[in-house]
Amino acid sequence: MKGKPMMPQHAPAARICRDCDGFAAVVITTGSCHTDGTRVTLTVGCPACHGTGNAPAARFARVGR
């Protein structure tokens, strides 16, 4: 490649949820099995981001008068 070297493009910083670190949902086995032999599981989402993995938008509070 001739000419000026290409600079890497910077992606905008993603707002990742600080409570779940982007891993918004987990699957937990209950220890029981269905009749076909598969495990019974529960899917649990992060209560802070509601399972999206993104941080909620910042809210501004009015301080002072």
Image (cartoon, grey):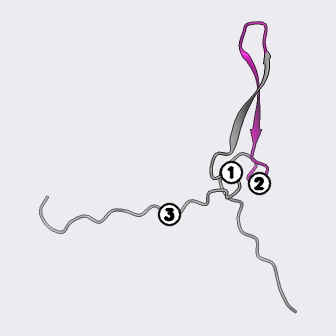
Which residue carries the number 1 mark? 20
Image position of 59 with respect to 52: above or below: below
Crowd rating for badge 3 (residues with CA inside 10 Å; few <14, some 14–19, many 20+): few
In space, the residues marked 2 and 3 are separated at their CA atoms by 22 Å
Task: Tell which circle, 1 or 3, labels the residue nearer the N-terminal end.
Answer: 3
Q: Nearer the viewer, mark 2 or mark 1?
A: 1
Secondary structure of residue under mark 3: loop
In the figure, is residue 10 to the left or right of 18? left
Residue reaching furthest front? 31
Crowd rating for badge 2 (residues with CA inside 10 Å; few <14, some 14–19, many 20+): some
Secondary structure of residue under mark 1: loop
Q: Nearer the viewer, mark 2 or mark 3?
A: 2
Quadrant of the frame with the C terminus: bottom right
Which residue is rendered at x = 50% and y = 63% of the image? 12
Image position of 59 with respect to 45: above or below: below
The answer to whether mark 2 and mark 1 are in CB contact below 8 A is: yes
Task: Tell which circle, 2 or 1, labels the residue nearer the N-terminal end.
Answer: 1
Which residue carries the number 2 mark? 48
Please give the range of residues in magenta: 33-50
Q: Nearer the viewer, residue 36 or 7?
A: 36
Q: Amino acid at mark 3?
A: Pro
Quadrant of the frame with the N terminus: bottom left
Residue reaching furthest top? 36
Which residue carries the number 3 mark? 12
Is 43 part of what is drawn in magenta?
yes
